[in-house]
Image (cartoon, helix red, strand yellow):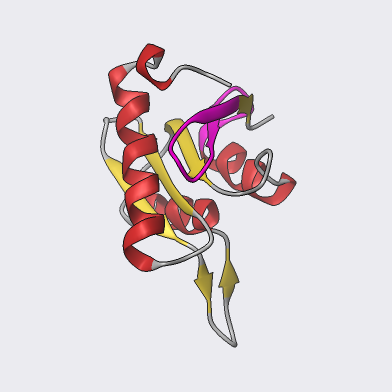
Amino acid sequence: MTDSSALDPEDRKIVTLARSARARNGVPEGAAVRDETGRTYVAGTVALDSLKLSALQTAVAMAVASGATSLEAAAVVTEAETASDADRAAVRDLGGADTPVLVAGPDGTVRTTVTAG
């Protein structure tokens, strides 16, 4: 586990935003990404009959749709132990292999940080 208070303030912010999205929308996961300009994009899981996206895939899609050309960092709040391969691939497509992905539990405690690579 990672002491969330030891996180960079901008990383702590995206974890908090991801946690808020999860709680507010009552979805399995919440996610947030920060683009190359410092803008953040926040999303929850999308589960429609015709469209299924994880929270992190949705946040990346929102960043792309808003004109982001790169990512500095990503965070996901989930029950899972780590970010899925599909989530890491979405982050990697926009941010590159070295983009950090913070994985936090529902309480906001960062369990691990992995790279998108």
Instruction: Give the residues in magenta.
Output: 95-112
Residue at 39% across / 12% down in the picture? 6
Using the image as rendered, state which of residue 11 and residue 72 is in the foreground: 11
Which corner quadrant holds the N terminus? top right
In the rendered structure, the answer to whether residue 60 lies left or right of residue 51 reads left
**From this viewpoint, which residue is outermost toward the bottom?**
49
In the rendered structure, the answer to whether residue 5 lies left or right of residue 1 reads left
Q: Is residue 114 magenta?
A: no
Using the image as rendered, state which of residue 104 and residue 8 is in the foreground: 104
Q: Is residue 107 magenta?
A: yes
Which corner quadrant holds the C terminus? top right
Residue at 45% across / 40% down in the picture? 107
**From this viewpoint, which residue is outermost toward the right?**
85
> Residue 42 in the image: x percent, y percent?
35, 51
In the rendered structure, the answer to whether residue 85 lies left or right of residue 79 reads right
Using the image as rendered, state which of residue 82 and residue 61 is in the foreground: 82
**From this viewpoint, which residue is outermost toward the front?**
107
> Residue 12 in the image: x percent, y percent?
34, 27
> Residue 47 in the image: x percent, y percent?
54, 76
Using the image as rendered, state which of residue 1 and residue 52 is in the foreground: 1
Residue at 31% across / 62% down in the picture? 24
Dividing the picture into quadrants, the one containing residue 91 is top right
Residue 117, placed above or below residue 80? above
Residue 79, placed above or below residue 88? below
Dividing the picture into quadrants, the one containing residue 26 is bottom left
| Count of residue discs | 0
